[in-house]
Image: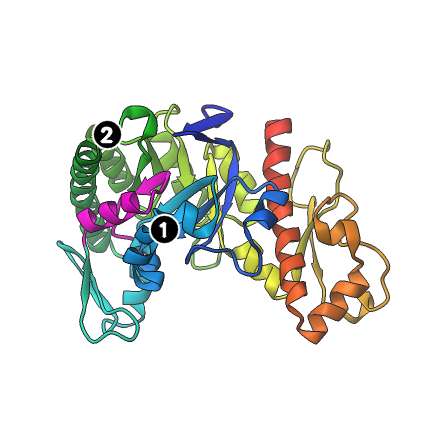
Amino acid sequence: MPHTPILHIRDKHLHLPAFLPDATLGYVRAVDSRDLESVQIQGLVMNTFHLMQKPGSSTIQAFSGLHNFADWHQVIVTDSGGFQAYSLIHQSDQFGTLTDRGILFRPEGKNRKFLLSPEKSIQLQISYGSDVVVCLDDCTHVDASRAEQESSVMRTLDWAKRCRQEYDHQLEQRNVDESHRPMLLAVIQGGGFPDLRSQCAHELLEIGFDGFGYGGWPLDSQGNLLTDIIALTRELVPPEFPMHALGIGHPLNLVKTYRIGYDIFDCALPTRDARHGRFMRYTVPAQTPLQGEDWLEYVYIQDKKYIKTDQPISEFCDCPACQHYSLGYLHHLFKTGDWLYHRLATLHNLRFMTQLTERLRSNRG
């Protein structure tokens, strides 16, 4: 179970468990910061690998960081870019390569390659004013060979040491005291090999971090949650350290992972589903414990049966879409392609996710 109901970060806090939408390029599509606050979003996950390309680090620094740039003054977590590099490079080596120095990649529209090293990743994240800084890591697929997983663990540990050193150097150079420093998270790799997970976790604990993330793809080739290895990774870390279930955000998987002991979740699925016409909704009131999987159902707004439906998406939801608009009207917006649909749909699915974490907090699972 989570170690504490509230995680304090600088002058901000997260009520745990917390779901953080992916705001990769500094925004959540179709909604603004006031919208996000209206559906009780506590924090956002932005991405260093993408932000350093668009809009570019000098632009962000001209606004004194991401909080001012995006007008978002709650928690910002900046993912280091390890997963994005893994995804990009595994498409084709023409996009870049992983070396012991860091990630060598060619930005879109550029002729020369750039190096995102562990040190550079930390420098950028701190200059962006991030509240939670994540170490650069070497991400792998769970089905990768043992040799690949061993290489990933060694590189992740080496990069973590360098990230820690650069983090301490940056705080000293900037004269940042303990109460104003961002959290520093390291990522535990090792694929599906328990001994490699154990080695990675043990050595990261020796280096010293404020919290840890589950590293690697969390699903098997059939799309099932890797419950055993996710649970093992949590068990390897003392309960006083918060754990971020990186990339886990399907409602059923979030509940399972929360009950294993993870605190923070992020995923693009709820907002992506919303834009493509799939709403999440509860089948039971807020006071009912979430047992099994029947508490979740989906509404596919393109279905013709909703053309004349004068009911909201959900009777249990207080988002703007459910409070003011019918399924029939949302169906009309979707079919005509109006951008109002994207805003209302996104707010509904995000409110579903924050209601989910509220339910888990109040019912303790």
Label 2 SS? loop
Residue name at image x 19 percent, y 34 percent: 168
Residue stretch in magenta: 117-142
Residue extending furthest front?
62
Query: Is residue 113 or residue 242 the one in the foreground?
Result: 113
Residue name at image x 43 percent, y 27 percent: 8
User: Is residue 224 shown to the viewer in this render?
Assistant: yes
| Left or right position of 190 against 256 | left
User: Answer yes or no: do the residues labelled 1 and 2 have beta carbons within 8 Å?
Assistant: no
Residue name at image x 45 percent, y 42 percent: 227
Res 180 → quadrant: top left
Q: Is residue 311 magenta?
A: no
Disc 1 or 2, which lies upstream in sequence?
1
| Left or right position of 334 against 230 | right
- Which residue was labeled with disc 2? 208
Q: Residues within 10 Å of mark 2 (few under 14, many from 20)?
A: some
Q: Is residue 5 above or below residue 20?
A: above
Q: Which residue type carries mark 1?
A: Phe
Residue 256, percent across and down?
A: 53, 39
Residue 106, percent across and down?
A: 23, 69
Instruction: Specify the label residue 63 is tagged with.
Output: 1
Q: Is residue 124 above or below residue 287?
A: below
Label 1 SS? loop
